[in-house]
Image: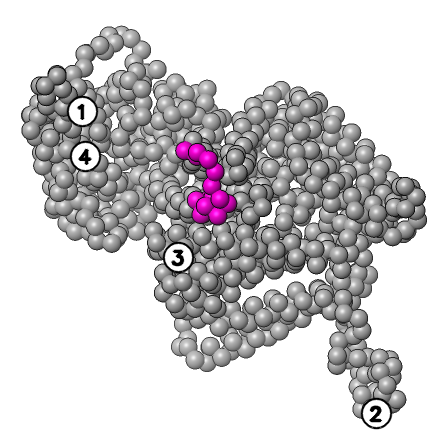
Amino acid sequence: MKGEGFLGKNISSFTHALESVILAEDLCRAPGLLQRLDPRVKVATLLLFIVIVGLARSLWILGVIFVLILSFSLLSKVPLGFFLKRIMLFIPIFTAMIALPALFITPGAPLVSIAGRVIITEQGARTAGLLFLRVSDSLSFGVLLILTTTWANILVALRWFRMPSLIVDILGMTYRYIFLLLHTTNSMFLARRSRTIGSFSSGQNRRWLTRALATTMVKSQHLSEEVYLAMLSRGYQGEVRILNALSLKRRDFIWVAFALVVASFLLWSNRL
Amino acid sequence: MNTSDTGCIFEAKNLSYDYPGKIAALRQINFSIMPGELVALIGANGSGKSTLLKLLDGLIFPTDGELLAFGQPLSEQTFKEATFVSEFRRRVGLVFQDPDVQLFSPTVWDEVTFGPLQLEISKDEVISRSREVLELLNIAHLRERPPYLLSGGEKKKVSLACVLSLRPQVLLLDEPTTGLDPWSQGNLIDFLIQWADKGKSIVFSTQDLDTVEEMAKRVVVLGTEHNIVADGKPEEFLSDPDFLLRTNLVHEHSHRHKELVHRHPHLHEHQHQRYGADENMVG
Amino acid sequence: MHIPDGYLSPATCGVMYAASAPFWYLAVNRVRKVLTSRTVPVLALFSAFSFVLMMFNVPVPGGTTAHAVGATLLAIVLGPWAAVLGVSVALGIQALFFGDGGLLTFGANCFNMAIVMPFVGYFIYKVISSNSEITSPRRILGVVIGSYVGIVAAGAVAGIELGIQPALFHTANGTPLYAPYSLSVALPAMVIAHLAVAGPIEGAVTGGVVAYLQRSHPSLIKADATGRKEGKFWILWGALGVLALATPLGLLASGTAWGEWGLDELKNIGLGFIPRGLEKLAGWWPAPLPDYGFPRMGAVIGYILSAVVGIALVIFLLWMLGRRLSHKNSPAQ
């Protein structure tokens, strides 16, 4: 069915997003290693390691980091298959596709020749490997953070790091309403699909889609007005006041020490 | 803020409101509400019930006429004064019809603590009040949940909880029983009646005439011309089928018995099967 | 067009964060002034909308699908400064929660999609539709062309960011450490991809939504929120922006820019002699940034940074001038 592809794709991507939130929230409450750490500590070490991944010059450092990531995820009770799927979902595959031509067109010393004609250079192989591993490592850190920290806690950490409270308030509320909008747009798509007999041209589909988008935008605008009134009704006067209830424990300090040791080692071996 | 000489909580004098674009929402509304009343606001869709509740909560202001709360006018000017606003917000709470509008915070706990925190109540007090309200409505286990992972009934309970944590004197509710299954409806009604027992006031809008019968001591009916067409005890109007038809509160139903067509207003008779007073009324 | 972590060096990421920061700062201040206490709910809902819009698969003739960004749409409905924040917040959540776009590269992605795109798109939209009726077809034309050019511009900037990586960041034996394709490959590839695919999608989606709004909710397509007098400044900002971004293209061109020859170049062109006065002047002004390069940094970044510093100086001088003039004209406060 010709027009079905785009409806199906949208429905599955929205559904997937909605499901992944539920899974993430569940995992955040599991009694694993990372779940028990203070969110501020997690955000700080995440950033530290992503920078290290960015600075790494050799493939083996990136490889070691990936092994570390896998062990952290296991210790945090994240199912391995789920974790790998989440990482490999499309960015590393997409990156592999981007990196592929680099194997052949990067100038340098020949490494391997295929069928005697096409040459893969050493530089080409290294650059493709570096790119692929870097992307995978960075992505994995982000995924680990999300799977072991609730969004509400991430916001508390950001606030502590002096991010302007206006931005944090917006981030929190945006996240909350994304799922509502996803849900209502998904219903729109499902309704459309259930009424689809035969197929539509892609032009018709685009027209329907832009109408659906416009409707969603109008709904967003309407919601924003109502939410504003709801906030006013309970005393909002421009700045949200919140309770702060975080405290560092001994395990947080141990983790920080461990992270610093590993980071220093990796940075030092980078120079070699 | 003192109550006026008459002791009214709300007093509307020729109150009118237009939507932006000069579309009439309410016309020439006159009533007063005394402390301890349980008032039901009914009328067909579009008759202005939600608008009236928002006016009562000082979220929008009259385009004509006057609305007084505790003796003070509700207007843009009076709401510029911060102390007046805080005091008013402490005393009056509005539970919106759509829980997705009411629940805008990341978690249930954030939501319930939002109100008292904005009103600068001490942190310890905020925590104890919020815990109490969650226990009261039996939703303490939902504390860390984000709103999009709650069921419809749970959302309604949290909506109520986050307003109750303000400990208001007056509770305004926009269609509180809509969307709830009969069992939850019954529980909610029982809860509200119990809550109002200690001298608090409730004004709620509803489409459901059964709820009105169970809960309200007074009914205000908004008509199709955006004014009040009736104001008094429920028994006075709710058994008058012509009145109900005129104000679009019921629909005319017809069914056939072979050649004979029966036409009558569709009223619901319900059995009273309430639980006994010693049973746990909040579930 | 979301660039993941790993494609840009940490140094480039730092520069892009620095480039975005002033826009974020200004955006927060502007938006707060206009929206006041409505800022949080309005921006939250529109960021959520922006996020969902970016997730939509749009059918492309040929059977596949593509994504739109919607930055220009947001700029038209809320104003460009609010669009900066709205798109940035949406990108932030995409990066953090869905891994779409990196955390280090967040600054660059915001610069491309949340800053360049809405401003370029809005600027062109304003220029084309100027004071025509809200419901006129000319508005739609402005919308379509504006959003088209906006996304192409964003793609071009992304192409530049990616394309300068191999030249600047490589190992001793020439292995590119980050994005492996040079400017002469990356830039044309990105520009062509956006001209041919992303651009038409963006134009069609933005145009379609605005056309629908024209009929159903024209009040959403409001007049310029920032005020009348901003109009003339748009042209100035737009021109400066284009110039700043075009500077690295100068590197692609061989030879030095016409008129900027140093003494050696003059000799080589064919002027057999060096005008006496020029010789005297040549050594007089030891510029702090000789040959547009910052010490110890790659040529291209140095080039761009010099352009930015130069423009900043010009703007600062103009602003000071403007203040002096307005103080003369307006009564003391």
Pick the front one: A61 or B127: A61
Span of residues in magenta: A195-210
* For residue C94, side relative to residue A251 (left or right): left
Kindly identify the residue that appears in the image at 31 percent across and 19 percent down: B181
Label 3: element kind: loop
- Identify the residue under disc 1: B209
Q: Amino acid at mark 2?
A: Arg
Label 1: element kind: helix
Q: Amino acid at mark 1?
A: Leu
Kindly identify the residue that appears in the image at 62 percent across and 67 percent down: C242
Q: CA distance from mark 1 to mark 2?
A: 101 Å
- Identify the residue under disc 4: B44
Label 1: few (<14), some or many (≥20) within 10 Å?
some
Q: Amino acid at mark 3?
A: Ile
Q: CA distance from mark 4 to mark 3?
A: 33 Å
Marks 2 and 3 share the same chain: yes
Q: Chain of mark 2?
A: C
Q: Chain of mark 3?
A: C
Assess whether mark 3 and mark 4 are in contact (beta carbons under 8 angstroms). no
Label 4: few (<14), some or many (≥20) within 10 Å?
some
- Identify the residue under disc 3: C221
Q: Chain of mark 1?
A: B
Q: CA distance from mark 3 to mark 1?
A: 42 Å
Q: Nearer the viewer, mark 1 or mark 2?
A: 1
Residue C318 at what x, y percent from top left? 57, 75
